Amino acid sequence: MGDFVNIPEIFGCDVFNEATMRKRLCSEVFNAWKQCIENGTSLPLDVANEIAVAMKQWAIEKGATHYTHWFQPMTGITAEKHDSFITPDGEGNIIMEFSGKELVRGEPDASSFPSGGLRATFEARGYTAWDPTSFAFVRDGSLYIPTCFFSYTGEALDKKTPLLRSIDEVSREATRILRLFGDKKTRRVIPCVGAEQEYFLLPKDLYSQREDLRLTGRTLFGAQPPKGQELDDHYFGTIRNRVSRFMQDLDEQLWRLGVLSKTKHNEAAPCQHELAPIYTAANNACDTNQLMMQVMKKCAAKHNLVCLLHEKPFAGVNGSGKHNNWSLSTDGGKNLFSPGQTPAQNARFLLFLAAFIHGIDEYQDMLRSTIAGAGNDHRLGANEAPPAIVSIFLGDELTAVVESIINSTNYEGPDKGLMRIGVDVLPPIPKDTTDRNRTSPLAFTGNKFEFRMVGSSQSIAGPNIALNTIMAEILARYASELEQAEDFEAALHTLVCRSFTEHQRIIFNGNGYSKEWEKEAARRGLSNLRSTPESLDAYLDPANIDLFKKHGIFTENEFHARYEIHLESYCKHINIEARTSIDMVLHQILPAATAYSAALSSGILSKEAAGLPCKAEKALAKTLSDAADSLYSTCQELQADLETVPADNRMAALYYHSMVLARMETLRQAADILEKYTDKSYWPYPTYSDLLYY
């Protein structure tokens, strides 16, 4: 990698994007593809064949020998099966072929992917279908084709398919609203997303010495170091040379793949960093976030580092999230959550704002469930993350606007006057006139909402499917009501006022970390679902089932399957962590502590024989012995706990949360005492001080 990188020249150079297609396809084929994208129709096979030939030739020129249908199964990560372009010519030679059929459709084995009961394990047939709205790219000698993944019976087995459905649905309902405001030009409304990615970087040699990091992604044991993050000296601090080289390499790789990598900096915890891309269409944002996580891991390995994406790799310091910035834009580039400078724009903005507030309040439990996971449970509610209570931060200025509408009082803003939606006296609504609230799960940041509850390792597809669908539902209700109104402005004012009034409980601008907010939220009737097993019950709520069925996002079977998959995943994660804890205790921690204790005891005997005092050694030996006995006893109890896990997935998840995790915490406390008092030369793996301050 050279010192100088010509970013405009390399950006998207490994992507078969629109500019490349325009150059390599004849105008008829390009226009046919473009029309399919704009109208949401299927691609004719002859057009697909022409695109496939051009795509293959382009990929071969880029050094590709294989192609893969790149999809996003319910594992939360991506999957790929690579096939070469070679085809025998019948004369002992080969030719490089790639057809439209191979481009449009693939058939990977689906038997080992999570299905939640949608198909039996022995029913292996699954299909991938090209998503022509997401561009193919070349990476590591293969042509990657973004695809949907579904079963033999047509049920979605992935995260992309329902995301695309939700994008279409919110576009349809938002366009209905725009027609009421006289907008006849907008054909599509596009959900836009920018996902800020937090992560940790560790030296590979230190990482490899910790079984817990290798198997679970987080440290199951570890005494607090003398210095944590209390000096705030890492946040936005000078980036280490080694990390800087990684970041430079990462940026270049992402730019070549058309990923809009924009911002990089040190985060609050030692060894923690953040990468933020530019805001883009939701489908593309979800694809590139998955790609970003893959590239980060590979790039880190190249620099003898390891990229940790777990939500809470280290106890006692900040964990990692993925701030999901969400908004709606027209195909003409107008942000529907931009307050605007005229009464008509403000009226439209306030209607979309009312719909968002209404939807989040009504479906708060469903939204909370989309970011549930074993890793995120350790993070939510801690100092670096919002609480498990869903609320919306609007800021003082916008809250004053909402309250004046609710109360029919004068708005004490730039222009004093009675707030009346759509009437000329409505003043321009200021933008960015308030501070940001880092404790809020959903904060309005000028022209979008920042959903801060998403975990760093999680796919952003689930939260955005929920946001799109919830918004589509409320906009559909509003459109149906306003389409029947005789006096549009009067009906609009009544609707917005009613919505703000009925759902104002979800608006909170204060400190989300405070105990007072927990009490206040309970008084308001807001949910506080602290754990994954609790929050996943939202999948069983008939209102949520009806929501996704009504809008065609999931069938009831597909929706229930996701519930089963999330429950099973939670149980498996905790089970792996528990078994890893036991293994480390029995084969690493106890042997190290007892070896040091034996050395101390031998020294005590020698000193006593010589008539020398050994008060310190005796006290230390007793502390070690007591902690070792407690550790061994708790380890036996944890082993017994794992033998009595209920068979039912829901009961098992609750059991893992209440019983197994609690036992693991007790186990950790005893182990961490041993770490504090055991001679470092005996300790079997790197400590927090070693890892965070290498």
Image (cartoon, rainbow, N blue to C red):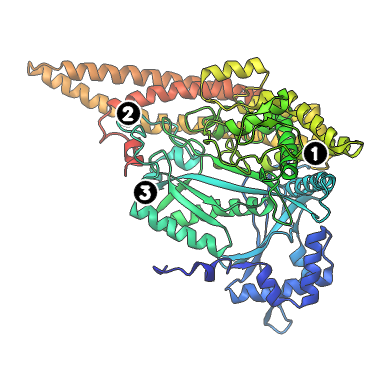
**Residue 205: assigned label:** 3
- Tell me the quarter of the picture where residue 117 sits: top right
Q: Which quadrant holds the N terminus?
A: bottom left
Q: Position of residue 580 (x, y in %)?
A: 48, 34
**Residue 675: assigned label:** 2
Q: Is residue 647 visible?
A: no
**Mark 2 neighbour density, 10 Å: few (under 14) some (14–19) many (20 or more):** many
Decide which of 431, 648 is in the foreground and name it: 431
Picture residue at 17% right of the left edge, 20% below the top: 604
The amino acid type of the residue labelled 3 equals Asp
Q: Is residue 319 visible?
A: yes
Is label 3 in a helix, a strand or a loop?
helix
Of callouts 1 and 2, the N-terminal one? 1
Q: Position of residue 537 (x, y in %)?
A: 71, 26
Q: Position of residue 92 (x, y in %)?
A: 68, 82
Q: Position of residue 639 (x, y in %)?
A: 51, 24
472 relative position to 139: left or right: right
Between the residue at mark 3 and the residue at mark 1, the CA separation in whole angstroms equals 53 Å
Between the residue at mark 1 and the residue at mark 2, the CA separation in whole angstroms equals 57 Å
**Mark 1 neighbour density, 10 Å: few (under 14) some (14–19) many (20 or more):** many
Picture residue at 56% right of the left edge, 30% below the top: 377
**Residue 475: assigned label:** 1
279 relative position to 563: left or right: left
Foreground disc of the pair 3, 1: 1
The amino acid type of the residue labelled 1 equals Leu
- Determine the residue located farthest toward the bottom in the rendered image: 91
Is label 1 in a helix, a strand or a loop?
helix
Is 34 drawn above or below residue 555 in the view shown?
A: below
The amino acid type of the residue labelled 2 equals Glu
- Marks 3,1: beta carbons within 8 A: no
Is 495 drawn above or below residue 519 in the view shown?
A: below
Between the residue at mark 3 and the residue at mark 2, the CA separation in whole angstroms equals 20 Å
